[in-house]
Image (cartoon, grey):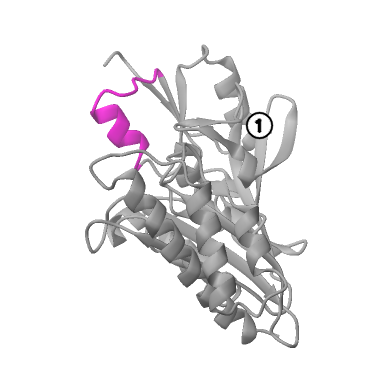
Amino acid sequence: MESMHYESPATVAEAVRLLSDAPPGSARVLAGGTDLLVQMRIGRIDPALIVDVKRIPETRGVAVRDGALVIGASLETMTLRRAPDLEKNFPGLAEAAALIGSDQIQGRASLGGNLCNASPAADTVPALIVLGAQAEIAGPEGTRRVPVAEFVTGPGSTVLGRGEFLVSLHVPLPAPRSADAYLRLIPRTEMDIAVVGSAVSVTLDAGGTCTAARVVLGAVAPTAIEVPEAAAALIGSTLDDAALGRAGQAATAACNPINDMRGTVEYRRKVAAVLTRRAAAKAAERAAGRN
């Protein structure tokens, strides 16, 4: 490793300037560091500049503002999980956030880092997408918002351009009788990478009929994928066994997985159906209890 320069700016503008002035490809943003430092240690990346954004107030907070939960990109997961009403309003997102490594890792890891690492198996990405979350990005041209569904463009690749970094995530507050759920399968009992992940959000009317739904799968394609056919199978139903079965079949059909040491293509497709059915049923049960 050649000499590396470390900066810890206190403002968004200062961070943008540092990233913009660095030669293309030479700078990396440090939010929590639990992925970045590992990649540096194994020699996958060798940045000349590290820009630590944890001193920037906009990247650190968690608060309800303008009808959304605003989560700073460098806010550690452990702090996020203790935020008032997180589990009540976003139980699926809370479930996904709780799966990012051990308690020690969660003292550093952040949702922003999990998103920017752009792993196909990231747990919080499907959970954010089903909630309609948006990413707030700062750069040389100012700030812009991008749906999380469009943020990751491929394994390790995002929409971030030169001089840009993720500042915060904006998650709309749920409508009445709406809820989400996230489930994954891993080879071990804890601290492993998802073989398949499934996030589902549903909205029910007063009679228990599903009026809106989203289904997103992780670890079955180069990026998290939304499955509108699975959502369509749920909408208009009372989420009975037949509707759940159709949603599971749609999830299987949407998969484009690979064979690796954690699972075969066939196995992942079968698991996607099972997890989607279970996550949808779980989300519906939660939604029925929300006013």
Residue at (75% x, 81% y) in the render: 205
Residue 38 counted in the magenta span:
yes
User: Which quadrant would the N terminus be assigned to in this image?
Assistant: top left
- Give the x, y percent position of residue 225: 55, 46
Q: Is 48 displayed left or right of 207 in the figure? A: left
Residue at (44% x, 53% y) in the render: 123
The one of 271 and 168 positioned closer to us in this rendering: 271
Determine the image quadrant of residue 135: top right
Callout 1 amino acid:
Ala
Determine the main secondary structure of the stretch shown in magenta.
Answer: loop
Relative to 185, does residue 29 appear above or below in the rendering?
A: above
Q: Is 142 displayed left or right of 2 in the figure? A: right
Determine the image quadrant of residue 38: top left
Instruction: Determine if residue 236 is in view.
Output: yes
- Give the x, y percent position of residue 19: 56, 23
Determine the image quadrant of residue 20: top right
The one of 143 and 199 positioned closer to us in this rendering: 199
- Give the x, y percent position of residue 266: 34, 48
What residue span does the magenta drawing correspond to?
Answer: 34-48
